[in-house]
Image: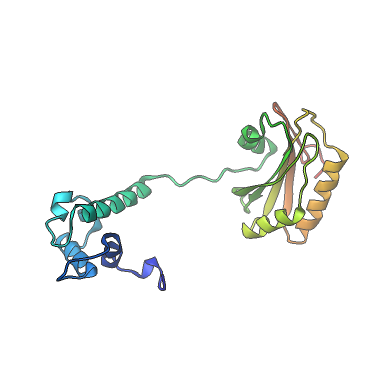
Amino acid sequence: MELGRRSLTNAELMAILIGSGSPDESAVSLCRRILSGANNSLDNIAKLEVKELCRYKGIGEAKAISIMAALELGRRRRESEPESKPLLNSSRRVYDYFRFTMQDLEHEEFWVLYLNTACKLQDKQLIGRGGNDFTPVDVRFILKFALQNTASSIILMHNHPSGTLKASQADKQLTKQIVSATALLDISVSDHLIFTNNSYYSFRDEGLL
């Protein structure tokens, strides 16, 4: 906890897994011996079976399985693909990415997408939930998450349960308020989308941003 996990040796990390050694040997010393027997290769240890690990005094089945499970998790991590961040550089891309979240809602929701300089998604946050035609939005929360994500730009989104594909005066006023607030932080509002079940309205595409 004091020095961080990356400061530990392989033997010390393995010792944490097994918890204890034997009456004659510490957990760290035991793990050094296991590593030595495998030419100090974690890959070689990962190939061992439970019975082979249990040949070392102080290693029972439970400890052997703990070591095998940890190494298997490491293998699966290496083979897994990191989750890609979607590129959201057009209103259509945003709509396709988020439409199922907004679909079939009987109340309004106001969401914000936080993007990096490459227009890739960093985070998404539900800012407000309301009734059929009104959603309370606290601009301070929008700014808070923007700073936490070091966002370069944001995309505003809300739905119209009524199916109306038109920005109301309240929608326009709120957008101007958010644009002014984020400008102080050098963060741009890339777009504001209004979702219905079957389509969308983009402030950017309509020349309102």
- Where residue 7 sits: x, y (%)? 36, 70
Residue located 80% across and 29% down the image = 164
Residue located 33% across and 52% down the image = 74
Residue 13, by quadrant, is bottom left
Seen from the viewer's position, the closer of residues 22 and 189 is 22
Query: In which quadrant of the rendered image does the C terminus lie?
Result: top right
Q: Is residue 96 left or right of residue 34?
A: right
**Vertical placement of residue 26 versus 64, above or below:** below
Residue located 16% across and 55% down the image = 53
- Where residue 29 sits: x, y (%)? 20, 70
- Where residue 151 sits: x, y (%)? 65, 55
**Seen from this angle, which residue lies furthest bottom?**
2
**Seen from this angle, which residue lies furthest right?**
169
Residue 12, by quadrant, is bottom left
**Vertical placement of residue 171 versus 160, above or below:** below
Seen from the viewer's position, the closer of residues 19 and 83 is 19
Residue located 77% across and 61% down the image = 184
Residue 80, by quadrant, is top left
- Where residue 66 sits: x, y (%)? 27, 53
Q: Count numbered badges in the picture.
A: 0
Q: Is residue 80 left or right of residue 187?
A: left
Seen from the viewer's position, the closer of residues 78 and 102 is 102
**Seen from this angle, which residue lies furthest front?**
23
The colour mode here is: rainbow
Query: In which quadrant of the rendered image does the N terminus lie?
Result: bottom left
